[in-house]
Amino acid sequence: MEQQAPNIKNLLIAGYLEGISYLLLLGVAMPLKYYADMPIAVKIAGSVHGVLFIWFLLALGRTTAKLKWPLSKAFVGVLASLLPFGPFFLDRYFKK
């Protein structure tokens, strides 16, 4: 159990940050681009979200390998990361 905690903690932190960045991209940067003529908002928020998304995928891959999770569990993680509020529901799912 001791080895499991740091892997899941890193994964959950990556998931929360990726989820927040996705919501900011969709809810703040996109409206600024289209309604306030500020395309730079999407460039900045999109870049940050891209980095956090890659970090999440790497953390998911590493956790899946270290804890020997089935690929179906990793697939749920990838699917959740594509949904706007998906990463916030992974906490309970991954701790099972």
Image: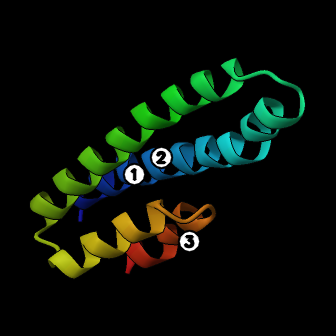
Residue 31 - label: none
Residue 42 shown left or right of residue 72 in the figure = right
Residue in the foreground of this view, choosing between 8 and 37: 37
Residue 68 shown left or right of residue 21 in the figure = left
Residue at figure coordinates x 23%, y 81% from the top left? 72
Dot in front, 1 or 3: 3
Residue 9 - label: 1
- In the rendered image, residue 70, in percent from the top left (x then y), is placed at 15, 79
Dot in front, 1 or 2: 2
Q: Residue furthest right?
A: 36
Residue at figure coordinates x 44%, y 35% from the top left? 50
- In the rendered image, residue 62, in percent from the top left (x then y), is placed at 17, 51
**Amino acid type of the residue tagged 1 in the rendering:** Lys
CA distance separating discs 1 and 3: 14 Å
According to the picture, the residue beneath numbered tag 3 turns out to be 89
Helix or strand or loop: what does disc 3 sit on? Answer: helix
| Residue contact at pointers 1 and 2, CB within 8 angstroms | yes
Residue 89 seen from this side: yes
Disc 1 packing (10 Å; few <14; some 14–19; many ≥20): some
According to the picture, the residue beneath numbered tag 2 turns out to be 13
Residue at figure coordinates x 73%, y 39% from the top left? 30
Q: Quadrant of residue 45?
A: top right
